[in-house]
Amino acid sequence: MADLTEEQKETLKKLKLYQKEYYDYESKFEYELFLLRQKYHDLYGPIYDKRREALVGTGEVKIGTPNLPEFWLRALRNNNTVSHVIEDHDEEILVYLNDIRCEYMKKNKEKKEGFILSFYFAPNPFFSNTVLTKTYHMKVVDCDNEPVLLQTEATVIDWYDNKNVLKKNVIKKQHNKNSKEVKTVQQTVNRDSFFHFFTSHKVPNSNVIKQLSKHEVAQLEMIIEGDYEVALTIKERIIPYAVDYYLGIIIESESNSIVSDVDSSYSSSENNSNYNSYESNNSAYNDENSNVDTNEYDDNEEDEEDVKSNEEPLTS
Protein backbone atom coordinates (compact mmCIF):
# COMPACT_ATOMS: atom_id res chain seq x y z
CA MET A 1 0.00 0.00 0.00
CA ALA A 2 3.02 2.23 -0.38
CA ASP A 3 1.47 3.92 -3.42
CA LEU A 4 -1.45 5.32 -1.38
CA THR A 5 -1.53 8.95 -0.37
CA GLU A 6 -1.82 9.92 3.28
CA GLU A 7 -5.49 10.73 2.82
CA GLN A 8 -6.12 7.37 1.15
CA LYS A 9 -4.32 5.55 3.94
CA GLU A 10 -6.50 7.36 6.48
CA THR A 11 -9.59 6.33 4.53
CA LEU A 12 -8.42 2.72 4.44
CA LYS A 13 -7.81 2.83 8.19
CA LYS A 14 -11.42 3.91 8.75
CA LEU A 15 -12.69 1.17 6.46
CA LYS A 16 -10.79 -1.45 8.43
CA LEU A 17 -12.39 -0.20 11.63
CA TYR A 18 -15.83 -0.39 10.05
CA GLN A 19 -15.10 -3.91 8.83
CA LYS A 20 -14.02 -4.89 12.33
CA GLU A 21 -17.31 -3.49 13.61
CA TYR A 22 -19.16 -5.66 11.11
CA TYR A 23 -17.22 -8.76 12.21
CA ASP A 24 -18.18 -8.06 15.82
CA TYR A 25 -21.88 -7.98 14.95
CA GLU A 26 -21.52 -11.03 12.77
CA SER A 27 -19.92 -12.93 15.63
CA LYS A 28 -22.81 -11.97 17.92
CA PHE A 29 -25.28 -13.04 15.23
CA GLU A 30 -23.64 -16.45 14.88
CA TYR A 31 -23.67 -16.96 18.64
CA GLU A 32 -27.33 -15.96 18.99
CA LEU A 33 -28.20 -18.19 16.04
CA PHE A 34 -26.40 -21.05 17.78
CA LEU A 35 -28.46 -20.42 20.94
CA LEU A 36 -31.68 -20.34 18.90
CA ARG A 37 -30.82 -23.64 17.24
CA GLN A 38 -30.01 -25.15 20.62
CA LYS A 39 -33.34 -23.92 22.01
CA TYR A 40 -35.34 -25.64 19.29
CA HIS A 41 -33.12 -28.69 19.37
CA ASP A 42 -34.19 -29.11 23.00
CA LEU A 43 -37.83 -28.70 21.98
CA TYR A 44 -37.48 -31.37 19.31
CA GLY A 45 -36.13 -33.86 21.86
CA PRO A 46 -39.50 -34.88 23.39
CA ILE A 47 -40.92 -35.37 19.87
CA TYR A 48 -38.08 -37.75 19.03
CA ASP A 49 -38.70 -39.56 22.33
CA LYS A 50 -42.33 -40.14 21.38
CA ARG A 51 -41.32 -41.27 17.90
CA ARG A 52 -38.93 -43.84 19.35
CA GLU A 53 -41.56 -45.10 21.81
CA ALA A 54 -44.08 -45.49 18.97
CA LEU A 55 -41.57 -47.48 16.91
CA VAL A 56 -40.02 -49.60 19.65
CA GLY A 57 -42.69 -49.88 22.33
CA THR A 58 -41.95 -50.78 25.93
CA GLY A 59 -41.51 -54.56 25.78
CA GLU A 60 -38.48 -56.69 24.97
CA VAL A 61 -36.91 -55.55 21.72
CA LYS A 62 -35.74 -58.35 19.42
CA ILE A 63 -35.42 -56.17 16.32
CA GLY A 64 -34.85 -52.47 15.72
CA THR A 65 -38.38 -51.11 15.32
CA PRO A 66 -40.85 -53.95 15.96
CA ASN A 67 -43.93 -51.73 15.54
CA LEU A 68 -42.79 -50.69 12.05
CA PRO A 69 -40.04 -53.05 10.87
CA GLU A 70 -37.09 -51.66 8.88
CA PHE A 71 -38.15 -48.08 9.60
CA TRP A 72 -34.64 -46.60 9.77
CA LEU A 73 -33.29 -48.80 7.01
CA ARG A 74 -35.95 -47.55 4.63
CA ALA A 75 -35.49 -43.94 5.71
CA LEU A 76 -31.74 -44.17 5.08
CA ARG A 77 -32.19 -46.03 1.80
CA ASN A 78 -34.58 -43.36 0.49
CA ASN A 79 -31.94 -40.65 0.81
CA ASN A 80 -29.64 -40.36 -2.19
CA THR A 81 -26.52 -39.42 -0.23
CA VAL A 82 -26.73 -42.12 2.43
CA SER A 83 -28.00 -44.88 0.16
CA HIS A 84 -24.74 -44.81 -1.81
CA VAL A 85 -22.78 -46.07 1.19
CA ILE A 86 -25.24 -48.82 2.20
CA GLU A 87 -24.44 -52.26 0.82
CA ASP A 88 -26.73 -55.29 0.68
CA HIS A 89 -24.78 -56.95 3.49
CA ASP A 90 -25.39 -53.86 5.69
CA GLU A 91 -29.15 -54.20 5.52
CA GLU A 92 -29.39 -57.27 7.75
CA ILE A 93 -27.62 -55.22 10.45
CA LEU A 94 -29.51 -51.96 9.97
CA VAL A 95 -32.85 -53.69 10.62
CA TYR A 96 -31.71 -53.74 14.27
CA LEU A 97 -31.34 -49.93 14.32
CA ASN A 98 -34.03 -48.44 16.55
CA ASP A 99 -33.06 -44.77 16.81
CA ILE A 100 -30.67 -42.07 15.58
CA ARG A 101 -30.04 -38.93 17.61
CA CYS A 102 -27.87 -35.83 17.36
CA GLU A 103 -26.43 -33.92 20.28
CA TYR A 104 -24.76 -30.53 19.86
CA MET A 105 -21.55 -29.70 21.68
CA LYS A 106 -21.66 -26.21 23.16
CA LYS A 107 -19.18 -23.59 22.09
CA ASN A 108 -16.30 -22.86 24.44
CA LYS A 109 -13.74 -20.07 24.84
CA GLU A 110 -11.58 -21.60 22.12
CA LYS A 111 -14.55 -21.29 19.71
CA LYS A 112 -14.73 -25.06 19.45
CA GLU A 113 -18.05 -26.77 18.90
CA GLY A 114 -19.42 -29.83 17.16
CA PHE A 115 -22.02 -32.54 17.27
CA ILE A 116 -22.41 -36.21 18.13
CA LEU A 117 -24.44 -38.68 16.10
CA SER A 118 -25.66 -41.69 18.08
CA PHE A 119 -27.03 -44.85 16.49
CA TYR A 120 -28.97 -47.09 18.89
CA PHE A 121 -29.21 -50.80 18.14
CA ALA A 122 -31.27 -53.62 19.56
CA PRO A 123 -29.31 -56.72 20.64
CA ASN A 124 -28.11 -58.34 17.44
CA PRO A 125 -25.89 -61.22 16.25
CA PHE A 126 -23.30 -58.91 14.63
CA PHE A 127 -21.72 -56.81 17.39
CA SER A 128 -22.05 -56.27 21.12
CA ASN A 129 -22.34 -52.46 21.04
CA THR A 130 -25.79 -51.07 21.81
CA VAL A 131 -24.80 -47.56 20.72
CA LEU A 132 -22.42 -46.49 17.95
CA THR A 133 -21.37 -42.84 17.99
CA LYS A 134 -19.55 -40.48 15.64
CA THR A 135 -18.31 -37.18 17.09
CA TYR A 136 -17.42 -34.20 14.90
CA HIS A 137 -15.07 -31.65 16.48
CA MET A 138 -15.34 -28.23 14.83
CA LYS A 139 -13.84 -24.79 15.32
CA VAL A 140 -15.04 -21.36 14.27
CA VAL A 141 -12.33 -19.44 12.45
CA ASP A 142 -12.37 -15.66 12.64
CA CYS A 143 -14.11 -13.97 9.70
CA ASP A 144 -15.63 -17.28 8.63
CA ASN A 145 -19.34 -17.99 9.04
CA GLU A 146 -19.03 -21.76 8.95
CA PRO A 147 -17.01 -23.80 11.47
CA VAL A 148 -14.25 -25.96 10.06
CA LEU A 149 -13.78 -29.64 10.80
CA LEU A 150 -10.83 -30.54 13.03
CA GLN A 151 -11.30 -34.26 13.58
CA THR A 152 -13.81 -37.03 14.12
CA GLU A 153 -13.97 -39.75 16.74
CA ALA A 154 -15.91 -42.96 16.22
CA THR A 155 -16.92 -45.91 18.34
CA VAL A 156 -14.81 -49.01 17.83
CA ILE A 157 -17.24 -51.73 16.77
CA ASP A 158 -16.93 -54.90 18.80
CA TRP A 159 -17.74 -57.45 16.11
CA TYR A 160 -18.67 -60.99 17.02
CA ASP A 161 -16.58 -63.79 15.51
CA ASN A 162 -17.01 -64.10 11.75
CA LYS A 163 -19.51 -61.22 11.66
CA ASN A 164 -17.31 -58.32 10.60
CA VAL A 165 -18.87 -57.07 7.36
CA LEU A 166 -15.95 -54.69 6.72
CA LYS A 167 -13.66 -57.47 5.53
CA LYS A 168 -13.81 -60.60 3.43
CA ASN A 169 -11.54 -63.38 2.15
CA VAL A 170 -10.82 -63.72 -1.52
CA ILE A 171 -9.13 -66.77 -3.02
CA LYS A 172 -7.07 -66.08 -6.12
CA LYS A 173 -4.95 -68.04 -8.55
CA GLN A 174 -1.55 -66.52 -9.30
CA HIS A 175 0.87 -67.59 -12.04
CA ASN A 176 4.64 -67.81 -11.58
CA LYS A 177 6.30 -65.84 -14.36
CA ASN A 178 9.20 -68.28 -14.67
CA SER A 179 7.94 -71.77 -13.88
CA LYS A 180 4.34 -71.21 -15.02
CA GLU A 181 3.32 -72.76 -11.71
CA VAL A 182 -0.15 -71.84 -10.52
CA LYS A 183 -0.43 -70.96 -6.86
CA THR A 184 -3.66 -70.48 -4.92
CA VAL A 185 -3.51 -67.77 -2.26
CA GLN A 186 -6.00 -66.32 0.17
CA GLN A 187 -6.14 -62.57 0.72
CA THR A 188 -8.02 -60.51 3.25
CA VAL A 189 -9.40 -57.30 1.79
CA ASN A 190 -11.70 -54.53 2.89
CA ARG A 191 -15.09 -54.28 1.31
CA ASP A 192 -17.52 -51.40 1.03
CA SER A 193 -19.90 -50.98 3.93
CA PHE A 194 -21.97 -48.32 5.67
CA PHE A 195 -20.13 -49.23 8.86
CA HIS A 196 -16.91 -47.69 7.56
CA PHE A 197 -18.69 -44.51 8.67
CA PHE A 198 -17.54 -45.40 12.18
CA THR A 199 -13.93 -44.57 11.41
CA SER A 200 -12.04 -41.75 13.11
CA HIS A 201 -10.35 -39.09 10.99
CA LYS A 202 -8.06 -36.19 11.75
CA VAL A 203 -7.80 -33.31 9.33
CA PRO A 204 -4.06 -32.77 8.78
CA ASN A 205 -2.51 -29.33 9.09
CA SER A 206 -0.84 -27.50 6.21
CA ASN A 207 2.62 -28.84 7.07
CA VAL A 208 1.44 -32.44 6.82
CA ILE A 209 -0.47 -31.77 3.61
CA LYS A 210 2.68 -30.36 1.97
CA GLN A 211 4.38 -33.72 2.47
CA LEU A 212 1.60 -35.62 0.69
CA SER A 213 1.35 -36.24 -3.03
CA LYS A 214 -1.49 -34.74 -5.03
CA HIS A 215 -3.07 -38.18 -5.27
CA GLU A 216 -2.88 -38.67 -1.49
CA VAL A 217 -4.39 -35.23 -0.86
CA ALA A 218 -7.22 -35.92 -3.30
CA GLN A 219 -7.87 -39.31 -1.71
CA LEU A 220 -7.91 -37.79 1.77
CA GLU A 221 -10.25 -35.00 0.70
CA MET A 222 -12.63 -37.48 -0.92
CA ILE A 223 -12.82 -39.61 2.22
CA ILE A 224 -13.22 -36.77 4.72
CA GLU A 225 -15.61 -34.71 2.61
CA GLY A 226 -17.71 -37.75 1.77
CA ASP A 227 -17.86 -38.73 5.43
CA TYR A 228 -18.89 -35.23 6.50
CA GLU A 229 -21.56 -35.03 3.81
CA VAL A 230 -23.14 -38.25 5.08
CA ALA A 231 -23.01 -36.93 8.67
CA LEU A 232 -24.68 -33.62 7.77
CA THR A 233 -27.35 -35.46 5.78
CA ILE A 234 -28.18 -37.70 8.73
CA LYS A 235 -28.14 -34.77 11.15
CA GLU A 236 -30.11 -32.25 9.10
CA ARG A 237 -32.39 -34.49 7.02
CA ILE A 238 -32.75 -38.07 8.15
CA ILE A 239 -33.31 -37.38 11.86
CA PRO A 240 -35.86 -34.53 11.52
CA TYR A 241 -37.64 -35.90 8.42
CA ALA A 242 -37.38 -39.64 9.11
CA VAL A 243 -41.07 -40.39 8.55
CA ASP A 244 -41.10 -38.56 5.23
CA TYR A 245 -38.03 -40.45 4.06
CA TYR A 246 -39.56 -43.73 5.19
CA LEU A 247 -42.64 -42.97 3.11
CA GLY A 248 -40.51 -41.87 0.17
CA ILE A 249 -42.37 -38.57 -0.17
CA ILE A 250 -39.31 -36.32 -0.05
CA ILE A 251 -37.91 -35.09 -3.34
CA GLU A 252 -34.31 -33.90 -3.26
CA SER A 253 -33.69 -31.25 -5.91
CA GLU A 254 -30.38 -30.59 -7.63
CA SER A 255 -29.79 -27.71 -5.21
CA ASN A 256 -30.15 -30.21 -2.32
CA SER A 257 -33.27 -28.46 -1.07
CA ILE A 258 -36.05 -30.61 0.32
CA VAL A 259 -39.55 -30.67 -1.10
CA SER A 260 -42.01 -32.82 0.82
CA ASP A 261 -45.46 -33.65 -0.53
CA VAL A 262 -46.73 -33.88 3.02
CA ASP A 263 -50.39 -32.98 2.58
CA SER A 264 -51.15 -35.49 -0.17
CA SER A 265 -49.06 -38.25 1.39
CA TYR A 266 -50.38 -38.03 4.92
CA SER A 267 -53.98 -37.89 3.72
CA SER A 268 -53.54 -40.97 1.55
CA SER A 269 -54.09 -44.40 3.00
CA GLU A 270 -51.74 -45.96 0.49
CA ASN A 271 -48.15 -44.80 0.39
CA ASN A 272 -45.35 -46.05 -1.74
CA SER A 273 -43.44 -48.26 0.68
CA ASN A 274 -40.96 -49.49 -1.90
CA TYR A 275 -37.53 -47.96 -1.73
CA ASN A 276 -34.90 -47.74 -4.40
CA SER A 277 -31.87 -49.94 -4.39
CA TYR A 278 -28.72 -47.99 -5.08
CA GLU A 279 -25.40 -49.27 -6.34
CA SER A 280 -22.58 -48.39 -3.97
CA ASN A 281 -19.93 -46.06 -5.23
CA ASN A 282 -17.95 -45.84 -2.01
CA SER A 283 -14.61 -46.43 -3.71
CA ALA A 284 -12.75 -44.32 -1.15
CA TYR A 285 -12.87 -47.21 1.30
CA ASN A 286 -11.44 -49.83 -1.05
CA ASP A 287 -8.25 -51.38 0.21
CA GLU A 288 -6.33 -53.72 -2.03
CA ASN A 289 -3.58 -54.34 0.49
CA SER A 290 -2.47 -57.93 0.78
CA ASN A 291 -0.21 -59.80 3.14
CA VAL A 292 0.94 -62.07 0.32
CA ASP A 293 4.40 -61.61 -1.18
CA THR A 294 3.75 -61.04 -4.88
CA ASN A 295 7.33 -60.41 -6.00
CA GLU A 296 7.51 -63.88 -7.52
CA TYR A 297 3.88 -64.33 -8.43
CA ASP A 298 1.94 -61.90 -10.60
CA ASP A 299 -1.80 -61.85 -11.10
CA ASN A 300 -2.75 -62.80 -14.62
CA GLU A 301 -5.52 -60.58 -15.98
CA GLU A 302 -6.91 -63.51 -17.93
CA ASP A 303 -7.56 -65.36 -14.67
CA GLU A 304 -10.07 -62.90 -13.22
CA GLU A 305 -12.73 -65.59 -13.53
CA ASP A 306 -10.69 -67.69 -11.11
CA VAL A 307 -11.27 -65.19 -8.30
CA LYS A 308 -13.62 -66.63 -5.74
CA SER A 309 -14.98 -64.58 -2.89
CA ASN A 310 -15.70 -66.05 0.48
CA GLU A 311 -18.71 -64.00 1.49
CA GLU A 312 -18.39 -65.03 5.12
CA PRO A 313 -17.21 -61.85 6.87
CA LEU A 314 -14.15 -61.89 9.05
CA THR A 315 -13.36 -60.77 12.53
CA SER A 316 -11.63 -57.44 12.87
Image (cartoon, grey):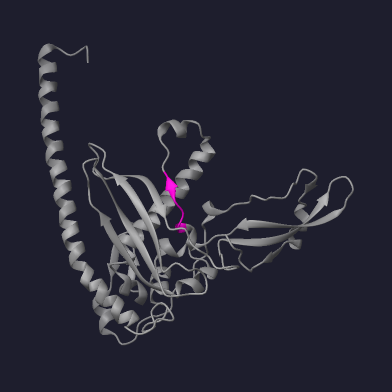
Considering only vertical position in the picture, is 39 above or below 49? above
Percent position of residue 142, x then y: 23, 36
Considering only vertical position in the picture, is 125 above or below 185? below
Percent position of residue 16, x then y: 14, 27
Considering only vertical position in the picture, is 226 above or below 63? above
- Residue drawn at x 16%, y 47% is 31
Q: Nearer the viewer, residue 242 or 81?
A: 242
Q: Quadrant of residue 313?
A: bottom right
Residue extending farthest to the bottom is 269
Rendered-image quadrant of the N terminus: top left
- Residue drawn at x 55%, y 60% is 192
* Residue 198 lies within the magenta run: yes
Q: Nearer the viewer, residue 171 or 303?
A: 171
- Residue drawn at x 43%, y 39% is 204
Q: Nearer the viewer, residue 149 or 144?
A: 149
Residue 254 in sight here: no
Q: Quadrant of residue 306?
A: bottom right
Residue extending farthest to the right is 179
Residue 87 in sight here: yes
* Residue 51 lies within the magenta run: no
Q: Is residue 174 left or right of residue 66?
A: right
Rendered-image quadrant of the C terminus: bottom right
Percent position of residue 266, x then y: 26, 81
Q: Quadrant of residue 231?
A: bottom left
Instruction: Give the extent of the magenta segment.
Output: 197-202
| Count of numbered circles in the view | 0
- Residue drawn at x 59%, y 52% is 287
Percent position of residue 93, x then y: 49, 72
